[in-house]
Image (tube, rainbow, N blue to C red):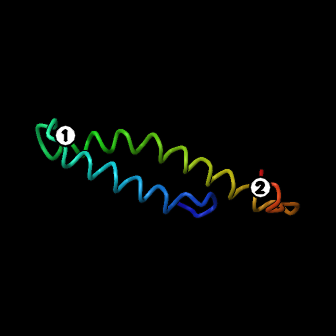
Amino acid sequence: MPPFAGQGVNTGLLDALILSEKLTHETYESLEAAIKSYETEMFMYAREAQLASAKNEIDMMQPDFSFKQLIQ
């Protein structure tokens, strides 16, 4: 993921938390089922971070870009 939204580390930490919870939860019949559940959840929140990063990358390439516009 490009670093233009500052979400890489946050997403990685969330990945680790969710995956560890899935792998240690007793409700999954197999390792593959736990990983599939994690991936389904991960694709939802990672997509949001990727979209924000892509938008910021495009915005930052504009000649009139200022970091002040990202601070709200």
Q: Residue furthest left?
A: 29
- Figure check: 68 above or below 24: below
- State yes or no: discs 1 and 2 in contact (Cβ < 8 Å): no
- Residue 17 at x, y percent in the picture: 34, 53
- Residue 46 at x, y percent in the picture: 47, 48
Q: Is residue 56 shown left or right of residue 48?
A: right
- Figure check: 56 above or below 32: below
Task: Give the residue at x 59% y 47%.
Answer: 51
- Please name the residue that numbered disc 2 is placed on: 71
Q: Secondary structure at mark 1?
A: helix
Q: Nearer the viewer, residue 28 or 65?
A: 28
Mark 1: give few (<14), some (14-19) or many (20+) Cα within 10 Å.
some
Q: Mark 2 or mark 1, which is nearer the start of the sequence?
A: 1
Q: CA distance from mark 1 to mark 2?
A: 41 Å
Q: Is residue 37 shown left or right of residue 44?
A: left
Give the quadrant of residue 36: top left
- Residue 4 at x, y percent in the picture: 63, 61
Q: Nearer the viewer, residue 15 or 1?
A: 15
Q: Is residue 56 shown left or right of residue 38?
A: right
Please state which amino acid type lies under the numbered disc 2. Answer: Ile
Mark 2: give few (<14), some (14-19) or many (20+) Cα within 10 Å.
few
Please state which amino acid type lies under the numbered disc 1. Answer: Ala
Q: Nearer the viewer, mark 1 or mark 2?
A: 2
- Please name the residue that numbered disc 1 is placed on: 33
- Figure check: 61 above or below 52: below
Give the quadrant of residue 56: bottom right
Task: Give the residue at x 81% y 55%.
Answer: 69
Q: Residue 20: which disc?
A: none
